[in-house]
Image (cartoon, helix red, strand yellow):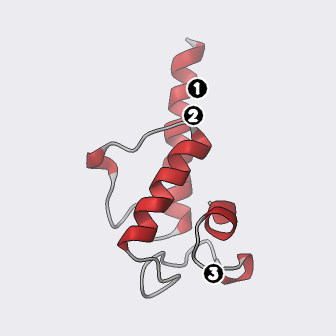
Amino acid sequence: MKDIIVNELDANITMEDIRDDISLYDDGLGLDSIAVINFIVLIERRFGMNFEETEISSRLFSNINNLSEFVYSKVHAQVDGLVR
């Protein structure tokens, strides 16, 4: 997630700026709604997954930890589905 923010999202943020528990919104990294949408698209491309509309929430994107855990579990579930 951090790599996407720093290297692919045009947000002028460095790795040092990103703590695992920092908010992605105004009170943290300062991502606006357009940046969050772009971030979603980049995550989907990077990890070969899609967010369902019902999955997208302010809590999910509240920090890197929440988002990383969600993406990991979703990708892991897709892989498990392919293996069976």
Q: Residues within 10 Å of mark 1 (few under 14, many from 20)?
A: few
Picture quadrant of residue 82? top right
**Distance from the alpha carbon under mark 1 to that under mark 2:** 5 Å
Q: Which callout, 1 or 3, points at the residue further toward the start of the chain?
A: 3
Which residue is drawn at the image coordinates 51% and 30% (left, top)?
77
How many dots with numbers? Answer: 3
Q: Residues within 10 Å of mark 3 (few under 14, many from 20)?
A: few
x, y percent for residue 24: 48, 75
What label sits on residue 79 in the rendered view?
1
Asked if labels 2 and 1 touch by Cβ distance under 8 angstroms, the answer is: yes
Q: Decide: is 64 above or below 75.
A: below
Q: Decide: is 4 above or below 13.
A: above
**Distance from the alpha carbon under mark 1 to that under mark 3:** 33 Å
Looking at the rendered image, the disc whose residue lies closer to the viewer, 2 or 3, is 3
Q: Which callout, 2 or 3, points at the residue further toward the start of the chain?
A: 3
> Is label 3 in a helix, a strand or a loop?
loop
Residue extending farthest top: 84
Which residue is drawn at the image coordinates 36% and 65% (left, top)?
59
x, y percent for residue 25: 43, 79
Q: If the image is split into quadrants, where does the N terminus sit?
A: bottom right
6 or 20: nearer the eye?
Answer: 6
Q: Which residue is mark 2?
A: 76
Q: Decide: is 48 above or below 41.
A: above
Residue extending farthest bottom: 27
* Residue type at numbered disc 3: Asn
Q: Which residue is mark 3?
A: 12
> Is label 2 in a helix, a strand or a loop?
helix
Q: Decide: is 2 above or below 55.
A: below
